[in-house]
């Protein structure tokens, strides 16, 4: 080896280790750490590691009590051994155990990696978006009418998380219609106002536009929003149907506006700014986004700042935004049954914020049990308290029912309860992610995939909405699937109704190399109806019935 090569190697190695106090790492280990951190950790802890749903993971961070004594230290203070234990076993604060996901060596790499100064990924501007944009089929070359005989309204778009694919399953025949490549670990699928197009967004920021009018569904455009994303929706207000698409990113912290039918990038708006406490935040990530039907606006929920933005898309060159203060850290949410109020979880504040999209103001900030996690929530008429919206909790064994306003004369008697928690239903433990019901059903379904007990994580609870004092029925989805038990948990998650509202589809989310399943129950009898166990069903998580997603039925 030449002297120059040796000198370069020494510089390279020193570069990889030049971090005060952090344990040594090779460049190869740093690359592994970066990849795992982005895929597994950044969602909860943030790219800059300032913490949100998860704790702050900066090397030199510290928390002090009112007398100035340090009560908690950063990752350098915790050190490799303690960090390895936390990563392997999880914490009572809600962090899941990674000993069945990462190898011992990977856990050791991560314990060392997070003691280093965070790697900051590059920004992503309009030029980068434009360079990534692929218009695979221009609008005038697409079908002019539906070319297949499939009942599109009852199609389920199912995320195959670790496969980086989306399965479209025919809800009538229960057969897989098509499996399409998408971004990595698609987070959500949303529908065009027309019900023809599906938009998906991967954690890697790739948006995929799928046209269901072909004989077989086909991807007609893709674009990258940034390095890390979770949300998309179209413009749904009368006269603007599908004119625009909005996508929100975790990194860079911003939202992007695109053409709804081609995904051509139009505009990027940064969400960097001040929190509701008045502190500047460099990484306020865009969490849930929803299109209003009341005005030409999107409701954009910014996680770290706790600010809810109403973005008026009627003139995107002169964009008007109303910024509503709520609480940190905003995450997921859904409409009330009138579709005037959007309710969003400020999960680390243990609150639900409700925005009145008619007046453009905060309608309420409701205290709840620990870490509300509604998905989109569930709306129904409570026998005693009238219209309510339900959320489950990641951090508590409860489902919270909040009374929501109604303009119906017959509901005037319920006004006294509006925005109050009117009932808390007991569940079998913490770890709920999603609740669901349907206007034609008398049942409320709740999962608990993040509960540490196998028995709970693999089951769902079903409540009788006519008598909420009755104990719920527990269905062990893993056992009902008939599949043999695997070492990794098979989490039962994301109940979703079919269009008719008489079946509930549950994902049985197993390990990447294990057989997973979609388990379908009859909603009335709670009897098992069908188990889909095609080998292509790899790590299924979110499922989106076309009609119910298009019309916000939940
Ligand atoms: Fe989600 C919705 C963020 C982990 C499945 N998730 C959302 C939304 C956000 C979000 C902001 C709301 C989107 C909207 O409505 O516009 N999710 C995050 C995270 O930051 C987090 C905690 C960590 C991460 O790294 O992503 C996270 N989410 C998960 C999972 O591990 C889940 C269970 C499995 C998976 O596929 O990754 C998961 N999230 C979902 C699903 C929805 C969702 C199925 C849509 C719910 C709905 O019914 O609308």
Image (spheres, rainbow, N blue to C red):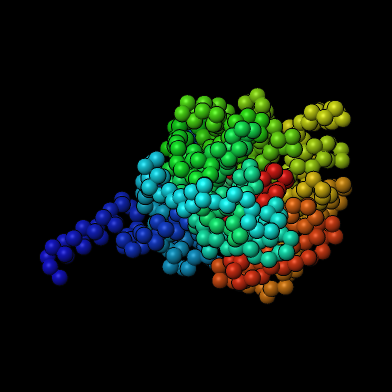
Quadrant assignment, res 16: bottom left
Q: Identify the residue shown where x is 12% and y is 65%.
A: 3
Q: Position of residue 484 (x, y in %)?
A: 68, 75
Q: Camera-side residue: 112 or 416?
A: 416
On the rendered image, what quadrant is the N terminus found in? bottom left
Whether 84 is drawn above or below 336: the answer is below
Q: Identify the residue shown where x is 55% and y is 29%.
A: 314
Residue 95 visible here: no
Q: Position of residue 417 (x, y in %)?
A: 79, 31
Q: Identify the residue shown where x is 49% and y is 56%.
A: 183
Q: Is residue 257 left or right of residue 554?
A: left
Quadrant assignment, res 479: bottom right
Give the farthest residue toward the top: 359
Residue 408 visible here: yes
Q: Camera-side residue: 468 or 267?
A: 267
Whether 331 is drawn above or below 460: the answer is above
Q: Is residue 28 left or right of residue 403?
A: left
Q: Is residue 196 left or right of residue 59?
A: right
Q: Camera-side residue: 82 or 363?
A: 363
Q: Identify the residue shown where x is 75% and y is 42%.
A: 379
Give the farthest residue toward the bottom: 484
Q: How many marks?
A: 0
Q: Position of residue 531 (x, y in %)?
A: 72, 68
Quadrant assignment, res 192: top right
Whether 495 is drawn above or below 194: the answer is below
Q: Position of residue 529 (x, y in %)?
A: 78, 65
């Amino acid at each position: 080896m030449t002297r120059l090569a040796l000198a370069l190697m020494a510089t390279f190695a020193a570069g990889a280790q030049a971090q005060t106090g952090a344990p040594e790492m090779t460049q190869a280990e740093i690359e592994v750490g970066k990849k795992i951190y982005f895929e597994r950790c950044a969602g909860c802890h943030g790219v800059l590691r300032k913490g949100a749903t998860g704790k702050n993971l900066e090397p030199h961070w510290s928390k002090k009590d009112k007398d100035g004594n340090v009560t908690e230290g950063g990752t350098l203070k915790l050190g490799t051994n303690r960090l390895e234990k936390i990563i392997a076993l999880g914490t009572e604060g809600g962090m899941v155990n990674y000993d069945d996901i990462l190898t011992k060596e990977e856990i050791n790499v991560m314990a060392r990696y997070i003691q280093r100064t965070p790697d900051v990924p590059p920004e992503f501007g309009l030029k980068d978006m434009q360079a990534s944009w692929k218009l695979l089929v221009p609008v005038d070359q697409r079908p002019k009418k539906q070319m297949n005989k499939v009942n599109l309204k009852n199609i389920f778009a199912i995320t195959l998380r670790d496969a980086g694919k989306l399965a479209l399953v025919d809800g009538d025949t229960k057969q897989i219609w098509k499996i399409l490549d998408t971004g990595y670990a698609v987070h959500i699928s949303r529908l065009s106002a027309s019900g023809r197009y599906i938009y998906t967004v991967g954690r890697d920021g790739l948006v995929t536009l799928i046209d269901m009018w072909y004989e077989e569904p086909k991807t007609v455009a893709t674009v990258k929003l940034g390095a890390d994303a979770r949300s998309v929706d179209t413009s749904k207000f009368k006269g603007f149907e599908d004119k625009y698409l909005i996508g929100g990113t975790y990194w860079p912290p911003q939202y992007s506006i695109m053409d709804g039918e081609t995904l051509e990038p139009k505009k990027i708006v940064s969400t960097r700014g001040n929190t509701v406490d008045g502190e500047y935040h460099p990484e306020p990530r865009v969490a849930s986004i929803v299109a209003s039907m009341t005005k030409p606006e999107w409701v954009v929920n910014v996680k770290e700042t706790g600010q809810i933005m109403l973005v008026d898309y009627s003139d995107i060159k002169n964009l008007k935004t109303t910024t509503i203060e709520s609480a940190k850290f905003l995450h997921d949410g859904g409409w009330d049954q009138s579709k005037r109020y959007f309710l969003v979880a400020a999960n680390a504040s243990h609150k639900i914020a409700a925005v009145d999209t008619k007046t453009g103001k905060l309608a309420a900030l409701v205290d709840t049990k620990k870490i509300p996690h509604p998905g989109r929530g569930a709306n129904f008429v409570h026998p005693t308290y009238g219209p309510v919206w339900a959320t489950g909790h990641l951090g508590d064994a409860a489902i919270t029912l909040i009374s929501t306003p109604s303009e119906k004369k017959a509901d005037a008697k319920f006004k006294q309860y509006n925005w109050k928690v009117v009932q808390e239903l007991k569940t079998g433990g913490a770890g709920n992610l999603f609740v669901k019901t349907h206007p034609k059903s008398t049942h409320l379904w709740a999962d608990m995939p993040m509960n540490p007990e196998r028995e709970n994580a693999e089951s769902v609870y079903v409540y009788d909405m006519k008598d909420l004092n009755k104990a719920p029925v527990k269905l062990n989805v893993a056992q009902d699937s008939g599949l043999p038990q695997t070492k990794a948990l098979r989490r039962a998650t994301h109940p979703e109704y079919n269009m008719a509202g008489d079946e509930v589809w549950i994902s049985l989310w197993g390990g990447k190399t294990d057989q997973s399943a979609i388990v379908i129950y009859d909603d009335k009898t709670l009897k098992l109806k069908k188990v889909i166990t095609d080998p292509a069903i790899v790590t299924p998580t979110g499922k989106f019935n076309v009609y119910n997603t298009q019309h916000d039925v939940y």
